[in-house]
Image (spheres, helix red, strand yellow):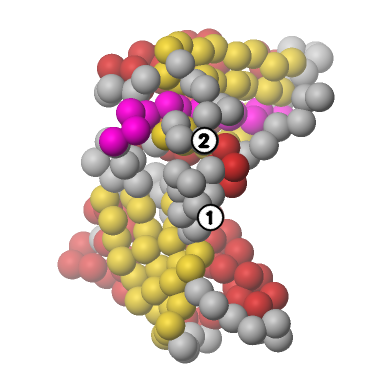
Amino acid sequence: MGQKVNPIGFRLNVRRNWDSRWYADKKSFPAYVAEDDKIRKFLKKKMKYAAVPRVFIERAGPKVRIKLFTARPGIVIGRKGSELEKLKDELQKITGREIMLDIQEIKKPDVVAQLVAENICLQLERRISFRRAMKKAIQTTMSMGAEGIRLQCSGRLMGAEIARTEQQRMGRVPLHTLRENIDYGFAEADTVYGKIGVKCWICNPSDVDTL
């Protein structure tokens, strides 16, 4: 009892698709997986304030096509595409391959679970009350047309001596129904008291594709 399954991995090939799409033989498979992980970690660190919830990687021979989903494309692209060219050069140095970068704008960031979790973390780092941040996020997400949202904060909340977990929810979030459009996000806030983990589950209408 009590074992949790990642809602995105649970729905692969039913409701969701893979974030890396390529084929490799036994020899090159581990290297490709490690390279994908390195690319994702680099982009997550580099694009911390660009609101990037998902990185899609596709391979065709020596070329690597990376699609960045972002709520702030202006930060990623930069003036006259200068930042985009810098990013492409840095990725080519890391991988040693030819990189093709695509930028996909997210129209409704308030219904993307990863972005909601990251937004709460940024507020916690600015010393805003976790209850206030959670309440505001729930109201905003529900007003954008989501069917339900569940938020969970864990750690030394409000600087308490003993770590605890607090939850808030609104609407319906059926985690066992595979056909439901459940989005999941996790982020960590680095506060003066230590790390606070934020988990977010959002149930969107089945016909809405958030990413």
Q: Is residue 103 above or below residue 3?
A: below
**Residue 17 seen in this snapshot:** yes
Q: State the residue at coordinates (43%, 61%).
A: 56
On the image, the x and y values in percent for residue 65 come to 39, 74
What predominant SS class does the magenta segment belong to? strand
Q: Nearer the viewer, mark 2 or mark 1?
A: 2
Q: Residues within 10 Å of mark 2 (few under 14, many from 20)?
A: some
Q: Amino acid at mark 2?
A: Leu
Q: Nearer the viewer, residue 78 or 62?
A: 62
Q: State the residue at coordinates (40%, 68%).
A: 66
Q: Which residue is mark 2?
A: 178
Q: Nearer the viewer, residue 174 or 134?
A: 174
Choose the circle earlier in sequence order: 2 or 1: 1
On the image, the x and y values in percent for residue 40 come to 54, 61
Toward the left, the furthest residue is 80
Q: Nearer the viewer, residue 156 or 167?
A: 167
Q: Which residues are magenta?
A: 194-207
Q: Which residue is mark 1?
A: 45
Question: Which quadrant is home to the N terminus?
Answer: top right
Q: Amino acid at mark 1?
A: Lys
Q: Secondary structure at mark 1?
A: helix
